[in-house]
Image (spheres, helix red, strand yellow):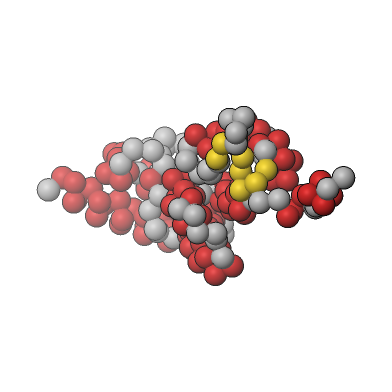
Amino acid sequence: MSIENNAPRSSTPVMSVGALAERSGFSVSAIHFYERAGLIRSTRNGANHRRYHRTMLRVLAIIKAGQRAGIPLAEIRSAIAPALAGNPLSRGAWGAISAAWRADLDRRIAALTLIRDRLDGCVRCGCLSHELCPIFNENDAAAAFGPGAAGLEDAGPPWPDAPEDQPRAALTLSSRISSASAKTSS
């Protein structure tokens, strides 16, 4: 046996799609998809088989992290562009990518938290089924906020849980609806 045959797999600079799939945790079909999408690159050997440089393991790990965070593939592609241009991603590059993604996640978490906190209150859908909706939505004034559950989309305060606070919130909301109605009717 030659020394090459006994070499550890990690010392091999290129690998087959099967080896890349095994090491990365992605299926072969997913690797082919990412290659067609321009997220990873391969070369061809003399037998015209795809060969992937081991740096694609890091790229695939970043793709997986981005997908788990809900980052669109276009943004992931932009983040890994240096690796696709032949510049391996460094620890510093990953730090910059993860900081940007973290900021995006924080914004989405804040928005989802706001929506979650408003689900128990009036969402100003115009259904008039809530006890106080005639106060909030007299003559369907909530239509001025646009279609759908406008109460989940604006930046106003969430509906209070305490019944004693609801009349004050109703007045505030009624005032906001009246103000919005006045703007749309002028």
Observer-nearest of 80 and 18: 18
- Tell which residue pokes out farthest to the bottom in this image: 92
Residue under the image location 66 percent in, 51 percent down: 13
- Report the label total: 0
Where is residue 134? Give x, y as percent. Answer: 38, 42
Where is residue 17? Give x, y as percent. Answer: 66, 36
Observer-nearest of 178 and 135: 178
Residue under the image location 67 percent in, 38 percent down: 16
Residue 44 visible (yes or no): yes
Residue under the image location 61 percent in, 53 percent down: 55
Q: In which quarter of the image is the N terminus?
A: top right
Observer-nearest of 39 and 119: 39
- Tell which residue pokes out farthest to the front in this image: 2
Where is residue 108? Give x, y as percent. Answer: 50, 55
Q: Quadrant of residue 149?
A: top left
Please, is residue 29 above or below residue 173 in the view?
above
Residue under the image location 23 percent in, 48 percent down: 181
Q: In this view, does 7 lie to the left or right of 72?
A: right
Residue 108 visible (yes or no): no
Where is residue 33? Give x, y as percent. Answer: 55, 33
Please, is residue 16 above or below residue 118 in the view?
above
Q: In this view, does 9 lie to the left or right of 177?
A: right
Observer-nearest of 84 and 122: 84
